[in-house]
Image: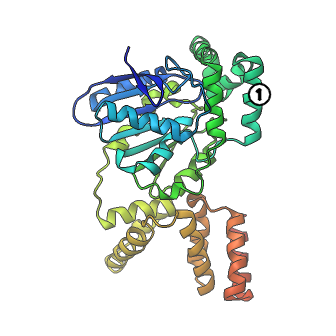
Amino acid sequence: MPFLSVNGHTLHYQHQQGAGSRTFVFANSLGTDLRIWDDVVELLKPHGSMLRFDKPGHGLSEVPQTPLTISDYVADVIALLDALQIGQCIFVGLSIGGVIGQRLALTYPDRIGKLVLSNTGPKIGTADSWNDRIQTVQQQGLSAIADGVMQRWFPTAFREANPTQVAAYKRMLEQTSPAGYVAACGAVRDEDLTGQIAKINVPTLCLGGTDDLATPPDLVQAMASAIPDARYELIDGAGHIPCVQMPDRVAQLILQFIHETPEQSLYEQGMKTRRAVLGDAHVDRAEAAKTDFDADFQQYITETAWGSIWSRPGLTKRERSLITIALLATLGHDDELAMHLRATRNTGASPDDVKETLLHTAIYAGVPVTNGAMKIAKAVFK
């Protein structure tokens, strides 16, 4: 079993060489070890090398002696990559592993070729919820929270159909070092990347689960909307650890993501962004209605509006959505306004965001303009 001394402690890791120069790096969730990726690794092995590791105080890695931050975990990843002479990787992070991935992409973007964020968010939970969990573990041990954790990890149907497997993962949690678990809880509690992830500039895939109680789909989708050009995939029926529950689906989505052509024409990028914002149904209708008369115009707006401006990294889709709504309301373009109000379901802009935008519009563009826009918004949201 390979071990490496990094940053004052010893890490347990597994590095399996594969074909080509591509290396996948996997970061585990709280209270688990590198074995949660076993089935996914088997499916991805033909596509590159595999690197997995146990966070401090998890699996066979040394228990931390001091509190840790997410940046400390990032430093461990970089030290491991350097020691194994891996320049760039495809980073796959689950839960706290995904928080590590976000911080890694912000701090060392040149070390990540593509980023997969599974069942995670830029800010997970509240300080009170983490402090309560830390106190319970310190006073009563991990067994006191194990049953509740299993309910968040795995949906009821999976638990009932796979009692032996769930019992094994419960043992994995209970055998985790309490000190290592508490250190990780504190690191997640203290990290809030909400205001920073719009600066992530690497291709990103965000995976959520419909039955995930720990990081619900809305959290993952909001994260995807905030990261420029991130792709969001919701796995139906998945709980918090889809790599255990649905490894085939997870591997399939990762492979689709990594095999996407990195260089796209302005039109292809525009069509991708247009679909992400307006939805496939709307774009399909527009494409079906296209004729020779307006084909050049449709190409023009797809390339310039969607491929150039909407695809720029400087603003999030949510921010661009709200700017667009304000301008369309001001100019009285009611049909376009209604279209972009409907699109807020995809951009992450909430009704409260739209309300504040229209109130701002009332000051700078006039009350009559906003009155009409409010009526349209009320009808769309209803």
Judge by depth and name the residue closer to the eye, 158 or 166.
Answer: 166
Q: Position of residue 330 (x, y in %)?
A: 62, 85
Tell me what residue is drawn at x 32 percent, y 78 percent. Answer: 296
Above or below for 219 versus 253: below
Mark count: 1
Residue named by callout 1:
135
Tell me what residue is drawn at x 66 percent, y 29 percent. Answer: 152
Element type at mark 1: helix
In this rendering, position of residue 199 left or right of residue 332: left
Above or below for 331 versus 173: below
In this rendering, position of residue 143 left or right of residue 168: right
Q: Please tell me in which quadrant of the rendered image residue 180 appears.
A: top right
Q: Which color scheme did the rendering employ for the protein?
A: rainbow
Say which quadrant the N terminus sits in.
Answer: top left
Q: Amino acid at mark 1?
A: Gln
Judge by depth and name the residue closer to the eye, 189 or 8.
Answer: 8
How would you rate the neighbour count of disc 1 (Cα within 10 Å): few for under 14, some for 14-19, many for 20 or more?
few
Q: Position of residue 290 (x, y in %)?
A: 38, 72
Q: Please tell me in which quadrant of the rendered image residue 269 appears.
A: bottom left
Residue 154 showing in the rendered view = no
